[in-house]
Amino acid sequence: MANPVTGSSTPLRSEALGAGLRAARQERGLSIRALARTLGCSASLLSQIERGVTAPSVGMLYMLAGELGVSIDRLLNLAIPEVPQEPPPAERNGSGRPEPWHLIRSLPPSLQAQVQRATGRQAVDFGSGVRWERLTTTADSRVDFMEIVYAPGSSSEEQVGHEGYEYGIVIEGSLTGRIGTEEYVLNAGDSISFASSTPHHYRNDGEITTRAIWFVLHTPHSP
């Protein structure tokens, strides 16, 4: 599916993602069959995911992350190829005069603004009409800040829960969210927030593509 912002869509790097999932499973001393029983899926499906033959759905990715104790952020780092973004030749300082880029780069990281250009977003296409576009320049273990895109008739499939708290607002189209036992239809301008531990999934029952901004605040991990 074409990306209306960047003009292209990046598929999951299934082999790298599968290798990461296999390593995480082996670290926990789990066999594929044992993990499959816990997740309620087939061992054959897990084997295909680990070998990079099949890309996991959104729901399966969250279930695997939760069961293996791996952050979604880490998995997406494996799944999304990093494309270096070329900095603009100059930025303007407070006086309105251009500031040479090499001077901006020399500032301490805490003083630099991280600008994600619309044409350089990192995107991951789940192959089912669902796409995530990261709205930060780099991965951040504290939050997931992204635009989610659902084609007509697409869904995140499995209803799953995970750590954290999430907030979302629909900016185009409509999105039906099943949160626990309740369903909510969100139209353009509607927003929602809830504890991510409540099992949930989303689908687009409309006839146009849905676009929404999603923000997932992760639970801080103890040192």
Image (cartoon, rainbow, N blue to C red):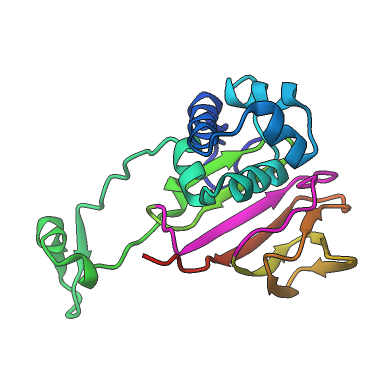
Where does residue 152 sit, x and y in percent of width and height? Answer: 82, 46
The quarter of the picture where residue 64 lies is top right
Where does residue 21 sit, x and y in percent of width and height? Answer: 54, 34
Query: Could you tell me if residue 27 is visible in this image?
Result: yes
Viewport quadrant of the N terminus? top right
Q: Is residue 140 magenta?
A: yes
Where does residue 114 sit, x and y in percent of width and height? Answer: 32, 62
The quarter of the picture where residue 116 lies is bottom left
Query: Who is closer to the viewer here, 96 or 68?
Result: 68
The quarter of the picture where residue 95 lies is bottom left
Seen from this angle, which residue lies furthest front?
A: 29
Q: Residue at x 66, y 68 (%)?
A: 168
Q: Which residues are the magenta region? A: 139-163
Above or below 44: residue 25 = below
* Most common SS among magenta residues: loop
Q: Residue at x 66, y 21 (%)?
A: 48
Query: Could you tell me if residue 127 is visible in this image?
Result: no
Q: Is residue 151 magenta?
A: yes
Query: Who is closer to the viewer here, 23 or 94?
Result: 23
Above or below 81: residue 168 = below
In this figure, what is the number of numbered marks?
0
Left or right of 4 on screen, residue 206: right
Viewport quadrant of the C terminus? bottom left
Left or right of 88 on screen, residue 172: right
Left or right of 2 on screen, residue 209: right
Q: Residue at x 76, y 69 (%)?
A: 188
Q: Residue at x 56, y 40 (%)?
A: 124
Where does residue 215 sit, x and y in percent of width and height? Answer: 57, 66
